[in-house]
Image: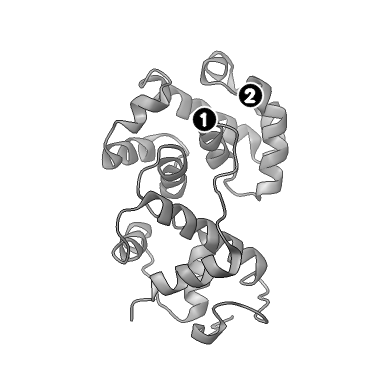
Amino acid sequence: MTPPYPLIYHRLLDAYGPQHWWPAESRFEMMMGAILVQNTNWLNVEKALHTFRPKMTPEVIDQMTAEELAPLIKSSGFYNLKAKRIKAFIDWFQTYHFSIDLLKKQKKNRLRSELIEVYGIGRETADSILLYALEKPVFVVDAYTRRIFERMGYDMPKAYDLFQQEVEQSFTDDVSTYNEFHALLVEHAKRHCRAKPLCSGCPLSDICQQRIS
């Protein structure tokens, strides 16, 4: 059975309100945040962004080595690896003359294919960049999303793209809806559907099978 995605979306929206994601001071910072948040929590990313922000322009990063960049993002964890990933992203971004406007003019599928080919940019990171920085209609699948729907009793596709397609079939291609839905799922995972869940007061409790292992 297909999950009632619109119902879940509106329940979470009523419970938590608009999330105003992604937290960043610029679209480029959104891109950097999408890379830095890999394998860590947002609090660590915020610390890294605070140190990184004075030098956070693509032109400045382009002139830096990965070794020079790494200390600036140390708080995000795996900083040597993430520095290499950021440098690879900057090499790709340079092919678009470091222009957000030029990127936004490109087709979603083309950009997604190119981003996934960039070293260290997987599907989740690519889709976060597409949705939040470039305003492309795409649903972001993350570990929180999988946890929530599996606990609710739905056997979701294992493959990222199939999971994504199933959700997107229930909505029109609307950037603001995909933006809010992903952000609301993250908020729900933080408040209720944690690793050790807090089911009391959950806005989805009446439609959740509570498959908790």
SS class of the residue under badge 1? helix
Question: According to the image, label 1 marks what residue?
Answer: 28
Question: According to the image, label 2 marks what residue?
Answer: 69
Q: Answer whether labels 1 and 2 touch (C-beta < 8 Å).
A: no
The circle on residue 73 is none
Give 136 or 126, whichever is nearer the viewer. Answer: 136
Residue at 36% across, 59% down:
164
The quarter of the image holding the C terminus is bottom right
SS class of the residue under badge 2? helix
- Could you tell me residue 98's position as x and y percent? 43, 20
Q: Is residue 28 left or right of residue 23?
A: left
Give 68 or 124, whichever is nearer the viewer. Answer: 124
Question: Is 43 situated above or below 150?
Answer: above
- Could you tell me residue 120's position as x and y percent? 47, 39
Q: Earlier in the sequence, mark 1 or mark 2?
A: 1
Q: Is residue 8 left or right of residue 103?
A: right
| Kind of residue indicated by mark 1 | Phe
Q: Is residue 79 left or right of residue 121?
A: right
Residue at 52% across, 65% down:
13
Label 1 to label 2, Cα distance in Å?
Answer: 16 Å
Question: Is 194 situated above or below 89?
Answer: below
| Kind of residue indicated by mark 2 | Leu
- Disc 2 residue crowd, few under 14, some 14–19, many 20+, Cα 10 Å: many
- Could you tell me residue 198's position as x and y percent? 68, 77
Residue at 47% across, 24% down:
90
Give 15 or 31, whichever is nearer the viewer. Answer: 15
